[in-house]
DNA sequence: GTACTATGTCACCATGCAGTGACATAGGTC
DNA sequence: GACCTATGTCACTGCATGGTGACATAGTAC
């Protein structure tokens, strides 16, 4: 489907081609190919043959250099920024966000989280994959997400008197919904009216999320209008 | 893997077997096999060969009787109660539920919805499938769910003064989260601490949902304590 | 130059898949 | 009984997959 150079080649003498032999470059080509296929065709298309073809490399090199497809995925999982960074959620100046009330902090943070996911086609694909299969790659990335979430929570110190019990549960429920819509958006335009593949649709989703945060994540004693 | 009778056979004379020829029964066997495989191995295992083997029938009959795998799935999609019935959500006596405040109605309805999904392994599988592929079966069932949701909404008349705009959005967000946890529960035990494969875990999820409903789905003018 | 190794190419295997054509026979009609 | 058709069996093609062994050659050390 995609025009791929059979391998990195140099034309030395006219009419002749000399194969460039560079293990490191070939490994990089293979890792890149995994990401390219994931973004373009989804995890269902991943396979020894497809990756080798995409990289313009013989598939035997996957076995020689990585040990097999599983190990290649393992290496891939440790090679990219599949997960939003903490600053991507908290913003350049976290103290700015921290000045806001708890509910606003979460409303903004969750909105940024959704945006960050929407920007990452490979991450979308991995979220989908995670729901369908358990393998090296999804395990690695699920664990990374868990640690990431822990760290994020540590940056969202509970307010003096926040209703902590509900807080984590509510946030995780919203995160689950975000993941659901993100994964769905790969194939569908909407979910019973909730538009999941346009900025406008996500603005509405963010509004709903914000409303839930405002009403749920209020410190005790206070109450909304 | 599973011991399957090569075909419905009757032993007439000892040492001899006579094949029972019954088109209707064979078609039913094939439809059953689809459900069995979906529930046991997931949609990834579905295929002409697998279904035929599970049914103990030659795969050529799939083509003769249904036209192919796609048409078989189409027939399967119209053959079961994959979706919870409205009464399954509203309860035996809907008027009982209707006597409650809006927020309680939704809290209970959404809880029952989640329970109904948890009871349906094939539906779980289809929810997962829907996030990964678009095909005859998922299209049929997605449309059915859309109609189902419309009807359900018609049974939840907005309160005199309810904040309707947020209502649908909030409900759909919660439904999305439920779907996410349901699909995840096929492979994982929890989601960053949210347990998705035990009654206790779902009780907690229901509590969170109920809290969101109580705080979000209140008619204007009122306010929670 | 010679020899060696690492890098890359190629041909092949076994397996599983969707799909098809030729054959066998049960059960009914005449 | 003879015959016909619908039902079911079987053997096969063509294709893609994951995986492997034998070969070719670039680059290097000597």
Image (tube, coloured by chain):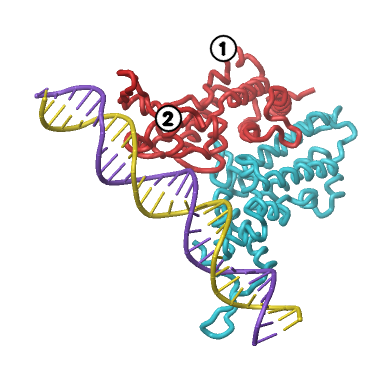
Chain colours: A red, B cyan, C yellow, D purple
Relative height, residue A3 to residue B97 (above, below): above
Q: Quadrant of residue B146?
A: top right
Q: Is residue B152 visible?
A: yes
Q: Looking at the image, is mark 2 or mark 1 earlier in the sequence?
A: 2
Which label belongs to residue A55? 2
Q: Quadrant of residue B52?
A: bottom right
Relative height, residue B53 to residue A106 (above, below): below
In this figure, which residue is indicated by the disc labeled 1?
A: A93
Q: On the rendered structure, is A125 left or right of A77?
A: right
Q: On the rendered structure, is B196 left or right of A134?
A: right
Q: Mark 1: which secondary structure? A: loop
User: How far apart are labels 2 and 1 at the CA level?
Assistant: 40 Å
Residue D28 picture location, percent across and down: 19, 22
Q: Nearer the viewer, residue B161 or A2?
A: A2
**Residue shown at 73%/54% (left/top)?**
B78
**Residue shown at 61%/60% (left/top)?**
B33
Residue B73 picture location, percent across and down: 66, 52
Q: How many marks?
A: 2
Quadrant for the C terminus of chain A in the image: top right
Residue A128 picture location, percent across and down: 57, 37
Q: Do tag 2 and tag 1 residues touch (Cβ < 8 Å)? A: no
Chain letter for mark 2, please.
Answer: A
Q: Residues within 10 Å of mark 1 (few under 14, many from 20)?
A: few
Tell us which disc is closer to us: 2 or 1: 2
Q: On the rendered structure, is A20 left or right of A85?
A: left
Residue B87 picture location, percent across and down: 80, 52
Q: Nearer the viewer, residue A127 or B136?
A: B136
Q: Is residue A20 visible?
A: no
């Amino acid at each position: 489907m995609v025009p791929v150079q059979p391998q990195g080649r140099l034309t030395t003498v006219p009419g002749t081609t000399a194969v460039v032999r560079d293990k490191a470059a070939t490994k990089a080509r293979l890792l890149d190919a995994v990401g390219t296929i994931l973004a373009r065709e989804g995890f269902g298309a991943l396979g020894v043959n497809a990756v080798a073809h995409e990289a313009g490399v013989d598939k035997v090199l996957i076995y020689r250099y990585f040990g097999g497809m599983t190990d290649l995925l393992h290496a891939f999982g440790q090679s990219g920024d599949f997960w939003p960074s903490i600053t991507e959620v908290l913003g350049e100046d976290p103290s700015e966000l921290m000045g806001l009330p708890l509910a606003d902090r979460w409303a903004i943070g969750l909105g940024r989280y959704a945006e960050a996911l929407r920007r990452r086609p490979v991450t979308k694909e991995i979220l989908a994959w995670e729901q369908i299969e358990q393998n090296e790659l999804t395990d690695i990335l699920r664990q990374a997400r868990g640690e990431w979430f822990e760290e994020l929570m540590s940056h969202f110190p509970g307010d003096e008197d926040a209703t902590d019990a509900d807080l984590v549960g509510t946030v995780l429920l919203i995160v689950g919904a975000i993941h659901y819509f993100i994964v769905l958006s790969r194939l569908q335009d909407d979910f019973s009216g909730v538009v999941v593949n346009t900025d406008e649709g996500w603005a509405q989703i963010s509004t709903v999320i914000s409303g839930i945060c405002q009403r749920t994540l209020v410190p005790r004693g206070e109450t909304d209008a």
